[in-house]
Amino acid sequence: MSFTFLRGVLAAAAISLAPVPAVLAADISGAGATFPYPIYAKWADVYKKDTGVGLNYQSIGSGGGIKQIKAKTVTFGASDMPLKPEDLAKDGLVQFPTVIGGVVPVINLPGFASGELTLDGPTLAKIFLGEIKTWDDPAIKKLNPKAKLPSDAIVVVHRSDGSGTTFLWTNYLSKVSPEWKEKVGASTAVEWPAGIGAKGNEGVANNTAQTKGAIGYVEYAYAKQNKMTYAKVVNKDGKAVAPSSETFQAAAANAGWEKSDSYYVILTDEPGAKSWPIAGATFILIHKQPQDPAVAAEALRFFGWAYEKGGKLAEELDYVPLPKDVVGLIKKTWAAEIKGADGKPLVN
């Protein structure tokens, strides 16, 4: 899937697949996180060919997805920030993860290739706080003693919309920087101390790519498909690591899904020499008693198909598929909690 295709479709902020006649199957509607858009688009394309069932997914950010599922205007919402069990209960929702990925710092610094610049959490926090203003700042020089760093001004690019990618980014910065935690905190939307805002992962990617001296943060698939330059990040074990399926998987190795309540798991700043420090799962939100049980059942069949047959497609885009035992837990959750008006499970 080319970036040209992604950029064109994402500009419209939706996956729009041609509908099939209602007599054949009901199309599924979803909205939310831009983080998983590349894999949801790929899955949707293949699933449509396999089953004739279409998916219309609005890539509008996690905040928008949460609002739309609460308003019951879509079959499912999508968020990179897991909702707490009490919030799910209040709105009659069930959540479950689909894939694991990573958020990466991307830079527009001529002369540097991906992985040639190393940053750490405290330095990233100071950059996004607006305290480190140039690329030749002593803190960056200390991490990159052999690099020829320019005196160019740093242009911070951040999300302007409610975003699960922002949640993961700010959650990480809050863990590694007491100053960030106190002044900004972690959420899908924060009061940014510095920088310019852009909508969606695609907006941050585009603005960073077009602005000399810029630094932003995007889901890794966007960085890879845009051929963007990313920085290595020093992890909790003090190792400078590059983003990859392997380092995302290392971060998720001790996720503890079986011990979590409603799959509330956050994977930032995880221990391990190979762990990428800004990893996270992306989640689906669906009502326990959907307004349209038939379409909700079709959505669950879509995700069931994705777990069973979509793993390789996910890996091709550098997402990490969920382990089989976690998929087994999720399917048990579906059977136990998502039901029709007759009280029977929508899928078995």
Image (cartoon, rainbow, N blue to C red):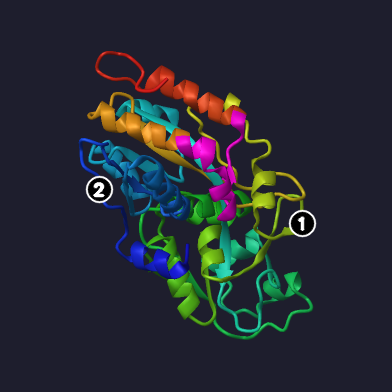
Q: Which mark is residue 113?
A: none
The rendered magenta stretch, by its main secondary structure, is classed as: helix
The extreme left residue here reads 22
**Position of 66 relative to 195 (above/below):** above
Q: Badge 2 local density, few (<14 within 10 Å), some, or many (20+)?
A: some
- Judge whether residue 201 is colored magenta: no
Q: What distance separates the C-alpha of mark 1 from that of mark 2?
A: 49 Å
Q: Is residue 117 in sight in this rendering?
A: yes
Q: Which mark is residue 239?
A: 1
Q: Is residue 195 in sight in this rendering?
A: no
Horizontal relation, residue 216 to residue 26: left or right: right
User: Tag 1's secondary structure?
Assistant: loop
- Percent position (x, y) of residue 2? 47, 66
Identify the residue shown where x is 44% and y is 61%. 201
What's drawn in magenta, residue-wise?
305-324
First in sequence: mark 1 or mark 2?
A: 2
- Percent position (x, y) of residue 184? 47, 55
User: Tag 2's secondary structure?
Assistant: loop
Q: Which amino acid type corresponds to the residue marked 2 in the rendered image?
A: Pro
Looking at the rendering, in which quadrant would you find the C terminus? top left
- Judge whether residue 314 is colored magenta: yes
Q: Which residue is mark 2?
A: 19
Q: Nearer the viewer, residue 323 or 337?
A: 323
Q: Badge 1 local density, few (<14 within 10 Å), some, or many (20+)?
A: some
Q: Nearer the viewer, residue 139 or 67?
A: 67
